[in-house]
């Protein structure tokens, strides 16, 4: 439901300049891979010692819920869309919006009371 709303540009005051949906999805995937340091693990993300605390937190979440990455991806997309609209961003500001999205996700993942993706404050943005 959330992706249908985003894809069809429904809900809220839409920006004058919208981002390309598919390109945004690819960039969000890459951003999450960087944030979770996934490119450092050649074979098994559980076997490699986490190099970042965000990765360690996420590996724990993933060990308890195989859908954790999917949920994080959905949350990341709606957070990025929300920030895009709040900043009334243009395509030239896409990287800035992506950076602020990453910063917000990292902050939320490191909150003491966040044990699952569903505990993240931004999870509530999903339909």
Image (spheres, rainbow, N blue to C red):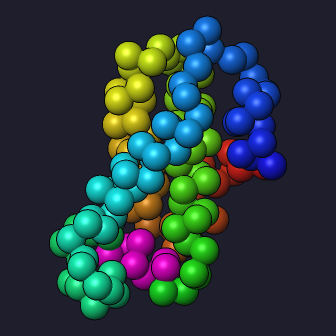
- Is 126 above or below relative to 45? above
Instruction: Say left or right for 4 vs 59.
Output: right
Q: Residue 5's image quarter?
A: top right
Q: Residue 36's image quarter?
A: bottom left
Confirm whether residue 106 shows in the render. no
Quick one: which residue is furthest to the top in this view? 16
- The residue at 32%/86% (across/down) is 44
- The residue at 61%/53% (across/down) is 74
Instruction: Say left or right for 124 vs 22.
Output: right
- Is 55 above or below relative to 76? below
Quick one: which residue is furthest to the front in this view? 22
- The residue at 44%/61% (across/down) is 109
| Coordinates of residue 106 in the picture (x, y in percent) | 38, 53
Q: How many marks?
A: 0
Residue 59 on the magenta segment: yes
- The residue at 57%/44% (across/down) is 77
| Coordinates of residue 31 in the picture (x, y in percent) | 36, 49
| Coordinates of residue 52 in the picture (x, y in percent) | 23, 67
Magenta span: 56-62
Residue 126 on the magenta segment: no
- Is 85 above or below relative to 4? above
| Coordinates of residue 66 in the picture (x, y in percent) | 57, 81
Q: Main secondary structure of the magenta part?
A: helix
- Is 2 above or below relative to 85? below
Q: Nearer the viewer, residue 2 or 57?
A: 2
């Amino acid at each position: 439901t959330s992706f249908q709303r985003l894809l069809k540009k429904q809900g809220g005051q839409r920006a004058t300049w919208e981002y390309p949906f598919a390109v945004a999805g690819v960039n969000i995937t890459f951003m999450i891979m960087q944030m979770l340091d996934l490119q450092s693990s050649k074979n098994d993300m559980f076997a490699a010692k986490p190099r970042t605390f965000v990765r360690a937190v996420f590996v724990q979440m993933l060990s308890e819920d195989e859908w954790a990455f999917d949920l994080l991806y959905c949350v990341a997309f709606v957070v990025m869309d929300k920030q895009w609209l709040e900043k009334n961003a243009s395509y030239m500001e896409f990287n800035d919006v992506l950076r602020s999205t990453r910063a917000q996700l990292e902050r939320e993942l490191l909150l003491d009371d966040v044990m699952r993706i569903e505990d993240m404050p931004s999870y509530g943005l999903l339909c």
